[in-house]
């Protein structure tokens, strides 16, 4: 009921494809594989189709409530959330394919990629601690995401450059920035990375242009002692002033534990700082200090932002004190000769 109420509040039923897509969902046949997973997780009553309808209504009503559970499938959970948030009829199409046909086919640079013929996903097995939609759809998305990555083998650079836009859809920016050298793991072009991020996302540096479509991004997650834990997929939602007048970056974190202490004073907030339901947030500079991948529209990005030196050095310092501590290239540590030598 709560999910349905929020769905109605969002007003998405005014989108022409939604009503017929939901009608299809009501009458959708459930394949044996999907039925088995739903029954293992939720039991035999109500029927699997009822659980799916409930899951669809909840996901469309609470697109930032999607969680990855105890699975390394943050990319798939992020995709479901982005589609529910921004492209709900596409989400319903994915559900229909997975539930009815036990197969999802997406395309990577024009080449069809099938979940049924993929060599395997990121997760060895997807656990049952998921909502009904994720329970059925994520195993397919996980295999497709991994297969797209395999199609990038041999290319120079990080495969997210090509996979993320193809996987998440046209709204994901085709421009790509990364501050880690894939081969060495060392930091690279950090200052340029920061300046371009400010130019793309910070309202004070991008002509006060709000973000139109949520964008996939990657963060270097750290623990409360600012030690590196791993790479993690999140969604950038918006940048705005909080109630105290501080510029914050609001994002979606699919890991079911959004209010995290990332160390060195970086405490992720989920309420009290202008967050909407399901959002996490950090002051803009703190968020940038944990960012390692982002996308942008290469046709809209301006010149590197003229970020003041003090703020720039604060962000760089937070990187060097946390996940980038052992990633600073040796040549960056060399003392500079005095002027005139």
Image (cartoon, grey):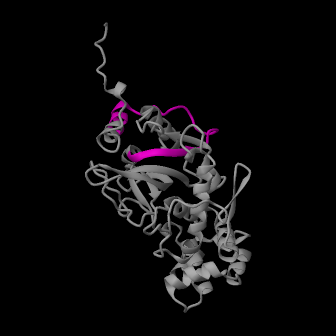
Q: Quadrant of residue 319?
A: top left
Say which residue appears at 57% left-offset and 56% top-offset: 146
13 or 297, which is in the foreground? 297
Q: Residue furthest bottom?
A: 45
- The C terminus lies in quadrant: top left
Image point (28%, 20%), residue name: 335
Q: Give the image location of residue 91, x and y in percent.
A: 64, 67
- Say whether residue 217 is left or right of residue 149: left
Query: Residue 202: x percent and y percent?
Result: 48, 43
Residue 116 drawn at (x, y percent): 66, 66
Does the magenta portion include 308?
A: yes
Identify whether 111 is placed above or below 80: above
Q: Residue at x 55, y 47 (%)?
A: 160
Q: Is residue 195 visible?
A: yes
Q: Which residues are magenta?
A: 290-315
* 67 within the magenta span: no
Instruction: Count every numbered label the image shows and give the total.
Output: 0
Q: Is residue 9 visible?
A: no
Q: Residue at x 50, y 64 (%)?
A: 124
């Amino acid at each position: 009921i709560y999910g349905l109420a929020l769905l109605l509040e969002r007003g998405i039923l005014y989108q022409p494809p939604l009503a017929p897509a939901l009608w299809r969902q009501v009458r959708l046949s459930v394949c044996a594989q999907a039925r088995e997973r739903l029954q293992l997780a939720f039991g035999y009553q109500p029927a699997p189709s009822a659980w799916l309808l409930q899951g669809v209504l909840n996901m469309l009503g609470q697109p930032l409530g999607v969680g990855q559970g105890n699975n390394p499938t943050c990319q798939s959970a992020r995709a479901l959330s982005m589609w529910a948030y921004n492209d709900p009829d596409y989400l319903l199409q994915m559900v229909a394919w997975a539930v009815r046909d036990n197969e999802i086919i997406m395309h990577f640079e024009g080449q069809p990629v099938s979940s049924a013929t993929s060599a395997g996903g990121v997760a060895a097995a997807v656990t049952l601690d998921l909502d009904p939609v994720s329970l059925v759809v994520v195993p397919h998305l996980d295999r497709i995401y991994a297969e797209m990555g395999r199609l990038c083998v041999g290319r120079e650079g990080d495969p997210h450059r090509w996979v993320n836009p193809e996987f998440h859809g046209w709204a994901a920016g085709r421009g790509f920035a990364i501050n880690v050298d894939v081969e060495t793991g060392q930091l690279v072009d950090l200052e340029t990375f920061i300046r371009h991020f400010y130019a793309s996302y910070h309202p004070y540096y991008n002509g006060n242009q709000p973000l139109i479509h949520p964008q996939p991004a990657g963060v270097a997650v750290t623990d409360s002692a600012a030690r590196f834990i791993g790479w993690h997929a999140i969604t950038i939602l918006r940048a705005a002033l909080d109630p105290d007048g501080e510029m914050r970056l609001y994002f979606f974190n699919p890991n079911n534990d959004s209010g995290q202490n990332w160390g060195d004073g970086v405490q992720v907030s989920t309420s009290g700082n202008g967050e909407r339901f399901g959002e996490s947030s950090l002051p803009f500079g703190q968020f940038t200090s944990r960012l390692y991948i982002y996308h942008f529209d290469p046709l809209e990005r301006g010149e590197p932002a003229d970020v003041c030196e003090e703020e720039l050095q604060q962000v760089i310092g937070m990187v060097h004190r946390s996940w980038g501590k052992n990633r600073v290239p040796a040549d960056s540590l060399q003392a500079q000769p005095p002027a005139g030598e």
